[in-house]
Amino acid sequence: MADKKLRIAWFTHLARANEEVSTISQYCSDLLLPFMKDEFDIEVFSGLPSGVHLGVPRYNTLNAYQRHRANPFDIFFYQIEDEPLGRVVRTQVGTMPGISWMHDTFLSDPGAEGIHTSPWERSVQQVLDLSLPFLERGDLPLQPQPQGYRETSVSPIVLYNSEWAEGTLHRFLSGRYEYASCGHRSDALPVPVTVIEDARSHEVGRPFQIVAASSARLDGRAHKFLPALADCSYSTHLTWIVEPSERADAQRMIGEFGVHERVTLIEGNSPDRWRSLVAKSDLALHLTSNPHTRLSPYLELSMAAGVPTVVMRVGRGESLSHDIAFSIEPGLHETAQLLGIFEALGAGDSRQFGRAGQNLVKDENDPAHVATRLATTFRESAPLLADVMRAWDGLYKRAEDALLEEIKALVDAPTGGMPGAYEMIVRPFVEEVEQGVLKPHVERA
């Protein structure tokens, strides 16, 4: 008899049919699900109504525990990213332990309102020691900023997009607790990318094409690469992608450095848009002085196109060798370093400097390879997650019982209550709920 497939509840934000894929969670899901849907029994949960996504059943996140009650999942898989569209998934992380793939190390978006006062620290402690009392009402401190502590601490298994990001876990996220004797586990799982064909123009005398995904704020270093563009002796053109809210600042800076004729501004990035632009480019800029700015999947997509890339030697840029990417040392000489790169690459076929990066992502970021690694994580994590979910179920049941006792004391109180109301009104309602779809608790063998 064949082994029963592991059941996976796969949480991700999904765009509507007429919307562009803008989140890294959907980008990764769309590449990985085709490789994994036959090996596992996967159901996708998003903010959309029920339907089908890439041949996989899709349900609204509000139906997750109805589906769990009907046929329990073995693994809850969450993709976490730093934007408002990811709030619904971040909320779910605290309702059932699972595997979280952190596409951002820190989360500046505050999350849904319920996250702000989530007693996640106490809940994790209580999983280990059911004798600990619940917090008093009102004793729910606001969560610290930047976010990220809660999402990693309540996830027994945490995945990151790079080895550098995983390393930050132990340096910056101090509020972590161990689940049982196994503790937390973490690993680096690269984002999937496919090779991008060279689509550059063969027009004689065409400008040297640069594409940049950098903020117009100080940490995006536009005040460094725009003067380098202005001073470049070769015919050079920059396609600069900024957020819509930064367009006015970007236009002002372009005017200050006198490069109107050399720059095309585009609002809003997406993996498909970047694939199209980088395929036509000679050089890609991924500049930021903020070590926690997300570079994936755009850095990997640039490499997949065989385009030489420029990063700053901060954060993840510190871990990239010189044969993989050009590194800019932060400081007074950033513009001079960038100008030197523009001049050197503008003199010949720049793509020869992108071959090492392309070979790297062919090996590390191939979707089939990434899917195999994630599948291995699912299989190896299943026993630990089963133990944790049983403990979590115990905590849920204990909280449920405590809440009912509190309700009973209130409604049956001699003063201000109605003695006997609990048995006549509350208990029948509770029993009806327990028999219906609203009860998430599942007894496990």
Image (cartoon, rainbow, N blue to C red):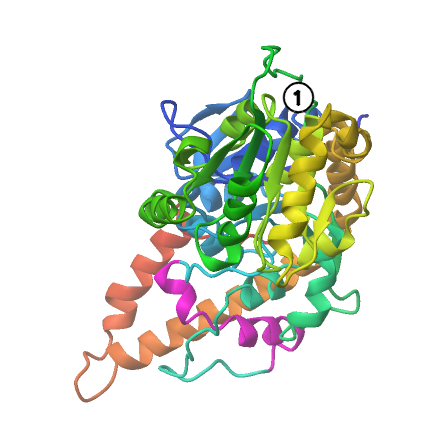
Residue at image coords 52%, 70%: 120
Majority secondary structure of magenta residues: helix
Write down the region rendered in magenta: 112-131
User: In the image as oriented, which residue stretches furthest toward the bottom?
Assistant: 415
Q: Is there any visible trace of residue 384 in the rendered image? A: no
Q: Is residue 322 left or right of residue 266?
A: right
To which residue does mark 1 refer?
196
Quadrant of the drawing holding the N terminus: top right
121 is higher (above) or lower (below) than 100? below
Horizontal and vertical percent position of residue 343: 67, 36
> Does 434 appear in magenta?
no
> Does 114 appear in magenta?
yes
Horizontal and vertical percent position of residue 345: 70, 32
Which quarter of the figure has residue 437? top left
Horizontal and vertical percent position of residue 360: 81, 34
Residue at image coords 18%, 78%: 418
Residue at image coords 69%, 44%: 340
Crowding at mark 1 (Cα within 10 Å: few <14, some 14-19, many 20+) = some
Depth order, front residue of 352/389: 352
Depth order, front residue of 187/214: 214
Circle 1 sits in a helix, a strand or a loop, which is it? loop
